[in-house]
Amino acid sequence: MTAAAALACGCAVSHKTVVKPGNAPEKLLTATKDELISRYNQQAQSITSLNATVAMKLTAGSAYSGVIEQYHEIKGFILAAKPADIFVIGQAPVVSKDIFTMVSDGDTFHIFIPSKNEFIEGPDNLERQASKPIENLRPQHLVDALLWEPFAGGAPVLYEEASEGANRYYVLTAIREEPGQSATKTSALGSSNWEISRKIWFDRTNLQIARVENFASGGKVASDVHYSNWLATPEPSNSAGGTATTALAGNGMYPHEISISRPGDDYQLQLEIKKLTINEPIAADRFVLKQPPGTRLVHPDEDAKEPQKP
């Protein structure tokens, strides 16, 4: 009755529409160049070894064929220790059958592929586009992504702000003199004989490292690694049998999702860390892989020297 009377007398009835506020943008943190260099160096210096169980997803370009492409995801076990030692096992899902075993000491890599009965051996600095990119997936690539090197003291570093879409970053760019250039020439005022060595991207919402780009000579991207899901990382058990949970020299965190892109090697690798222990002693013999009897020895560096067949 009241509503009818209101309409009859021409009285206006007001309605309020409540608009829910959108998600407020995350607050951006600030840091100076020196603070970011210190943060990166602390993180790099605080991790000397790691023992990880991971899920690995590997994709590559059209040239890719071999022992991994049939699996959507494989299980992996990684041991790595500075300066450059690494041991990796890749297993098929469900049946836990070894697909490959890889080791590297920073100078030479070895890869055993049971299904091919092949034992591959070559120098870590081998630059070659293999017809079977399993040979491109070398263990040293994982060392570079998992164990970082700090900035050298006094090395030139540039500092800038950057954005990609709605994301905001700080970027540190390390530069180096071009190969073959003398220190006198490259240090001269106004010299242009410099090239980019690497770029470190910091997410400004938390100042965690979000991305590391490494560059080969001539400005080519050697690797582009993205880091996310930073979680607190316990150190190995102490002598009393408990677990050491004190913060590391860095910030006590380590990324548990790592995406590695190697454009020149024609593959991308995603790592999801399921279990991780850092800074535990690892015996040197854990990084030794001997050729199994009866396997075929392959030297991709020697193959690369052979003339191409017409």
Image: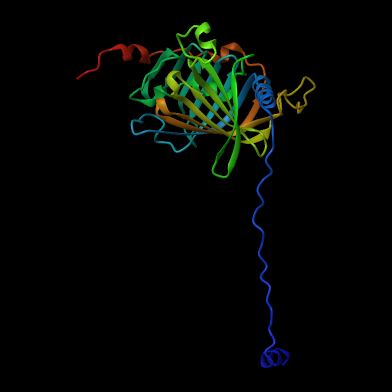
Q: Is residue 51 left or right of residue 75?
A: right
Q: Residue furthest front?
A: 190
**Residue 163: x and y, percent?**
56, 39
**Residue 149: x and y, percent?**
60, 18
Q: Nearer the viewer, residue 224 or 141?
A: 224
**Residue 106: x and y, percent?**
51, 13
Color theme of the render:
rainbow
The N terminus sits in image quarter: bottom right
Q: Is residue 299 visible?
A: no
Q: Residue furthest right?
A: 240
Eyeballing the image, is 3 above or below 268? below
Q: Nearer the viewer, residue 236 or 255?
A: 255
Give the residue displayed 48% in from the left and 22% down from the top: 215
Quarter of the image for residue 249 reads top right
The C terminus sits in image quarter: top left
Give the residue displayed 68% in from the left and 26% down from the top: 39
**Residue 98: x and y, percent?**
47, 27
Q: Is residue 255 left or right of residue 138?
A: right
Quarter of the image for residue 174 reads top right
Eyeballing the image, is 242 above or below 12? above
Q: Is residue 63 visible?
A: yes
Eyeballing the image, is 200 above or below 179? below
